[in-house]
Image (cartoon, coloured by chain):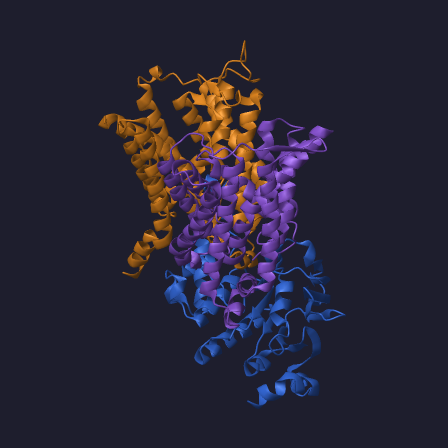
Chain colours: A orange, B blue, C purple
Amino acid sequence: MNIEQLVLTVLTYGCLYGVMTVSLNLQYARGGMINFGTVAYFAAGAYAYAIFTQEPPSGLDQYAFGFNAPWWIGVLAAGVASLLFAIITGWPTLRLRGEYLALTTFAFAEVFHSFLLNERRIGNGSVGLSNVNRPDFSVIGLEDKYAFATAAVVLLLLTALLCRRVLASPYGRAIDAIRDDEIAAETVGKDIKRMRFQVFVLSSVPIGFAGALYAMITTLVSPNLFTAEVTFFVWIALVLGGEHTIKGVVLGTIALVTFEEVVRSFHFETVRAAEIAASVEHIMTGAIFIMILRWQPFDRIKKKRAAA
Amino acid sequence: MTDDILVVDKLTKRFGGLKAVGGDSGLSFKVKRGTLVGLIGPNGAGKSTTFNLISGVLPPSSGSVSLNGKDLSKIKTSDIASHGLGRTFQTPRAFPSLTVLENVMVGADSPGERLMPVLSGAWRGTEAALKDKATEVLAKVGLEGRLNETVSNLSGGELRMLEVARQLVRDPEILLLDEPTAGVDPSLQGKLSSILVDLHKEGRTLIVVEHNLHFLLRIADAVIVLQNGELLAQGTPHEIKNDQRVIAAYLGDEYAA
Amino acid sequence: MTLIAQYFVTGIVTGCFLILATIGFSLTRRVEGFLNIAHAELLGVSAFVTWGLNVKMGWPFLPAGLFAIVFTAFFGLIVGRIVYDPIRKLGPAVLLISSVGVAYVIGGSVDALVGTGIRSLNIPLATTYRFFGVRITDYQMIVVALAALTGLSLAIFMTKTKTGLAIRAMSDNPGLAASRGVDVQQTSRATWLLASGLAGLAGVMLALIATLSTDIAFHQILQILAVAILAGLGSLYSVLLAGLIVGVAMDMSVYFIPAGYRPLIAFAVVIIVLFLRPEGLSGRKSK
């Protein structure tokens, strides 16, 4: 196990997924919205980046679009793509509550996934788009892996700052009030639908950027990278960190990523052993998830501190 | 401006087959600007439901409510507050995530609640003034020492005061109060009474649902009596006290007690 | 023309399977009050227990299937008591989110024990019958027959037996039911047994007519959700109609659009129903 490699991977992916967890935190813990379709906004960003930065189709390529634009246009496109997807999926759904919202967002994400899988013109269907463009980091003299780690950290910091800015303001106050008691919030003039929609759409933008970063790192976008597994991963990280504070959810994400990377780094004798390890990891993640939801250790710690 | 700030016209509300408000012909009454109106009736008379209909929490089955001539059914519920109507609830509602002070500050319409000012930070100038106003209002209801506490520390009566404060920071033209004395210490009721009298003197219109008739009939200008969701009687406190129908239906036992 | 009829018939079979898979899910929703995402994993448990007994231990199909159903019923009960009962007070949203964790645990366990790869039962090859130019196998007919039988039994159970009436009372108004002498604990237990048993039955059917892989359970949840939502969350009788509609829609869609979009039909149903008529076919307002 190469320690430096492990640290770098944990940092990069921890921060990258951390961006999604922080956004999800804004949507759920503060905004009271259950979004089970998070992966779709991630995928929208990744695919937008890939499509905008790749060369136009030629030869055997099945995809239809490629704009060969520079990487920063790709990143912008990623943000816009997830923003648009959030507007389209958010506007009609946000009047739904709780489990209905969870199901609809989940359904939308699966529709999108199916779409990517079947419409070859968008992204080569199940084959996906490979050789995704990476920015040229030689300009700043950093090796790719260090540059990406830095980029992930920066993106996370920017996302956290954005959330902080929104939450530590009258807007955040109003959002908290709405989450606590909608009817009372309405009697003091809070427009619930408008604010929820804004939070939903705003928090999707960092997810899109994370998607672009992901595409850069893997240089591959294909539908099987963007399944509901990703959504549930982020959700588990959210709960693990004690959904509420930004610091907490980031730590939860890093813990989960570390756990996964450590398991992955073991060398297994047989394929079967590796499979079992992956399954056990799955089981443990689920079990810890359930236990945290049940015993809510973070709430207890918070209450103890408040009472003291 | 018309003399009637609130006009309720043939209002009905049905839940399934149950006629909660308005019976068959609908509930109709008018509220004159600047008056303190008592809304009384036995349990289940439909008083809170009427409040919910007026404040937009429930949509009417038929009929209409007009505020300053504007039909409230055409307005979004959250906009009703910006037209000058506020209300409190039978069971006080507070925001547990916020402190006492924040509970009142969130009552106001801060520019920081719009997305652009939040992102640009342009709201910061207004916070101080809002904080001052909220503190002032909290002092009026006697909660000035509890500003930074969590609402879970507050008693039922204090929560009611908090609700009133949250509405007051909005400077409402008309305020609907649902059983404001319920759960309030008899010693605090005097304070509540003087708050309502002050609001009345400031020219605001108040509609108060109350079971405590000793409290209400002393300060009200007019009284509306509901029974089974329909209008039983309306008039001055004196008229109502002596109205046989009202005594028979409700008042007799209460006032004797 | 025959092709459409063929797709229609296949759709009925799929629909009948979906009915079996979803009734337990809707029952859980109705009595326990939340959407149990892990319900689909129970299908996997049942299917692989059947496979394990049949292929690995040489049991004939029938006893293997019966054992699997009973096993799954009790398994579901244990999970319900240990995991969900203690957190019921936290509300349906938390229960929904927790069920994702449960799905992970159950799914991971099945993965670990069974391993990847395609599996099928050790049973005689299906015999195909032809009616009016449409093909159907004997196994498929079993699914249809069982769905009909289940529907009927459920109707009798819910209207004539003490437990069935208790379940109905509890789902409509738990507080009132309790005050009228309904044993809430016992009814809850009965619900878990029944719902999980039904999932077990669906799992055995799955083993019968489909090829098994360890991720098959997850793919079912999406379709189960579609049927449950179309029926109206918490409604049971409407599941019968909703299951058939979704099954037929999915299979007949293959005639018009590429086969890859078949699962999409289920999701499209979810989205359309939630926008136009969230109460679903039954018109029942859920809590």
Q: Quarter of the image containing the N terminus of chain A?
A: top left
Apparent side of residue B226 relative to residue C224 in the rendered image (left or right): right
| Most foreground residue, C208 or A281 | C208
Residue A86: tell me if it is visible. no
Q: Position of residue C283 (x, y in %)?
A: 65, 54
Q: Position of residue A100 (x, y in %)?
A: 55, 47
| Most foreground residue, A246 or A101 | A101
The picture quadrant where one finds residue C267 is top right
Q: Quarter of the image containing the C terminus of chain A?
A: bottom left
Q: Residue furthest bottom?
A: B256
The picture quadrant where one finds residue A22 is top left
Q: Residue at x 61, y 43 (%)?
A: C144
Q: Residue at x 70, y 58 (%)?
A: B70
Position of residue A230 relative to residue B86, above or below, is: above
| Most foreground residue, B212 or C62 | C62
Apparent side of residue C148 relative to residue A82 in the rendered image (left or right): right
